[in-house]
Amino acid sequence: MLKIALQMDDIETIDIRGDSSFALALEAAARGYEIFIYHPDNMAYIPGAGVTATGKWVQVKDDVNNHVHVLSEARIDLTELDVILMRQDPPFDMHYITATYLLETVMDKVLVVNHPASVRNAPEKLVATQFHELMPPTLITSDMSEIKAFRAEYENIIVKPLYGNGGSGIFHLKPEDTNLSSLIETMLLIDRSPLMIQQYLPAVSQGDKRVIMIDGVAAGAVNRVPAKGEARSNLHVGGKAERSDLDDKDLRIADAIGSFLKEKDLLFCGIDVIGGYLTEINVTSPTGLREIKTLSGIDLAVNIWDSITSKL
């Protein structure tokens, strides 16, 4: 029987209806695996003991009112496990990066998914620029003159924090909007990191498609449609999930980046596609599994665990 862990946010407070980590935990339970849950704050390097984590051995079930039962609390040596799923949400900051360093120290004895060094070296918005020919016009900078020049050329733009997630801090600036300078100044006061500026894609009104990649291959998709009057399609800010199949544009993008993901041991990823353009590659804690199962009946958690166990 495999012993697996999910390094994630508090499982007792998540909304299981849209949580991909919970989907993975459910499939692990169906296979009879022992499940340990811990938060990265509870990791420690202890002299003589290596890297440990304090957490909970749990049972899970698909019941929104009673989804987790704690069997026991424990501090364990992470090398006692067979598989660790690195599933905590961003922001991608030094806290996140430190967790990748700690996990690297146990990789000679434990399979960590996704590979922590590759996660660290593939910040989601930056890594997509390796495939710039698939993206809409994109600028990454904190230089106001460069941002103004980009805005002058493309007029209708999206401004994003480079290391943000979940749609937080994303702004749509239309050509007539006079707030660009003030907005950029404010964003850079909050976080000195560069910003991502992209040409606005009107096709987002028809949806921002999340394509699930498993070991470098496109396995399924869900379309996320923004609420009326909203530029962001993220589900937790009001976007609506709709069933979607993989089309030729999705497959073209997936084929172009699949070998890169596979080579880097980025086994479970999500790519975002708007109007046939790649906008992001999500490698930290991609979502979409629960929505795809609800809308299509396809449980991609099964495919993910098949791929993981094949590597053991």
Image (cartoon, rainbow, N blue to C red):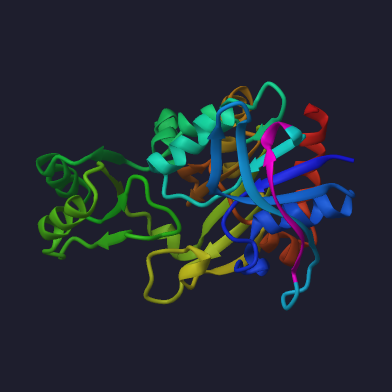
Q: Which residue occupies 13% across, 54% down?
A: 185
* Residue 145 visible in image: yes
Residue 71's x, y, as percent? 79, 60
Judge by depth and name the residue closer to the eye, 249 or 151.
151
Q: Which residue occupies 56% across, 56% down?
A: 9
Residue 85's x, y, as percent? 66, 42
Judge by depth and name the residue closer to the eye, 98 or 175.
98
Q: Which residue occupies 26% across, 42% down?
A: 193
Main secondary structure found in the magenta portion:
strand
* Residue 217 visible in image: no
Pick the quarter of the image with the N terminus.
top right
Q: Look at the picture and state if 117 lies above or below 158.
A: above
Magenta span? 67-79
In the image, is residue 78 part of the stretch drawn in magenta?
A: yes
Q: Residue furthest front?
A: 48
Residue 247's x, y, as percent? 64, 47
- Side of 76 relative to 156 (left or right): right
- In the picture, residue 72 is in which quadrant? bottom right
Judge by depth and name the residue closer to the eye, 286 or 25.
25
Residue 94's x, y, as percent? 38, 39
Pick the quarter of the image with the C terminus.
top right
- Side of 32 relative to 283 (left or right): right
Q: Which residue occupies 54% across, 32% down?
A: 102
- Side of 35 relative to 16 (left or right): right
